[in-house]
Amino acid sequence: MATAMPTEKSGKVVIRNIGLLLSGDIDRPVLDADTLVVSDGLIVAVGKEADCDIAQAQTVIDARRTCVAPGLIDSHVHPVFGDWTPRQNQTGWIDSTMNGGVTTMISAGEVHLPGRPKDIVGLKALAITAQRAFDNFRPGGVKVLAGAPIIEKGMVEQDFKDLADAGVTLLGEVGLGSVKAGYEAAQMVRWARKYGIQSTIHTGGPSIPGSGLIDKDVVLEADADVIGHINGGHTALSEAHVCELCEKSSRAIEIVHNGNEKVAIAAAQAALALKCPHRVILGTDGPAGSGVQPLGMLRMVALLSSLGGIPPELVFCFATGNTARLRNLNCGLIEVGRAADFVFMDKAQHSAGRDILDSIALGDIPGVGMVMIDGIVRCGRSRNTPPATEIPVVLGAAH
């Protein structure tokens, strides 16, 4: 199993001959640039090759006119420990997802831990342990932001302060524990927000036996920062209620792979109609009963583009820059100072599309030719996507 330590440094990296540079910025999704320069994991230059300092690079990558985009951010995962999920008894799922272009994952709760503690001391201990463990361990180089406690009845404000003081920045899905009433959830969400902890709420029918329905009124009353899987996980609220949530709430609209696909499209189109596409973020909601989806994020991009009629360059922003901004991450956008987390893609071999964007609009998943995290190459041609028509090449050092 490939692992990475957060202390590794990339040195100076030059990526040249980029054919299409997607920014992740929904206000300007495509950049007029063909070169990126990275120093020790951060972007230091974006532009035309003639205008960039490309000398003395430890690594030069010829993108061979392929597409470079920010690494995908899965806004909704359920990790446990290491690169193993007891939900499906599967190992290597995070590394496998990195082969699908994902460079950052955000936990919505370590809910699948066998014997998950539900007492207050235990749930706080689990959250702190998960946060610490994934801060020190990166399967496949992927940044897993974990440690998301499932809130339970009896928690008081001091518990949220304790969690924040220990480094916890997330709440697991509100509604997966014993707190299901809107007024109860709202109080705890406010305590979390006071101490800088971001919250996500379950939306829709029960995901597994033991969980319950969270309807639109509870979602609106709780006012969590993220309307988690607004298209259900798996069972969605009615389209009318989902559109009402988009209209009446100002919070992030999270659409996931493991949800209702028809409602996923309706939610994305509602956000566009309401002129708030910056609120839409994407996740997989895996591992789950339906398994792990290494290509789940790319499948969501293709779904919303091909069947939802949304330009693919905009949908990539849902999967990158929107999430980075709403979750205050230093990745997800191609701009100076951001983390050098990139996915190199091209249209799949023999796709009917003219180019990568056209192929996605037709419903095809692109081929991943390389994934880079913090300026370090983590995989070449993906073992999971269809083969890309062209792939980048590492040329070595420049003088």
Image (cartoon, rainbow, N blue to C red):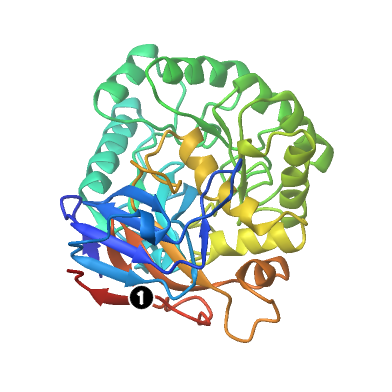
| Picture quarter with the C terminus | bottom left
Estimate how packed mark 1 is, as few (under 14), some (14 to 19) or many (20 or more) residues with alpha carbons within 10 Å.
some
Most distant residue in the bottom direction: 350
Residue located at (35% from left, 64% from top):
15
| Residue 47: image location, x then y, percent | 42, 53
Q: Position of residue 8 (x, y in %)?
A: 16, 55
What residue is at 26 percent from the left and 51 percent from the top?
41
SS class of the residue under badge 1?
loop
Q: Is residue 245 left or right of residue 149?
A: right
Compared to residue 110, the image places residue 345 above or below, namely below
**Amino acid of disc 1:** Gly
**186 vs 43: above or below:** above
Q: Give the residue pinned by disc 1.
A: 380
294 and 129: which is toward the camera = 294
Q: Is residue 162 above or below residue 236?
A: above
The mark total stands at 1
196 displayed left or right of 259 = left
Judge whether residue 188 can be spotted in this image.
yes
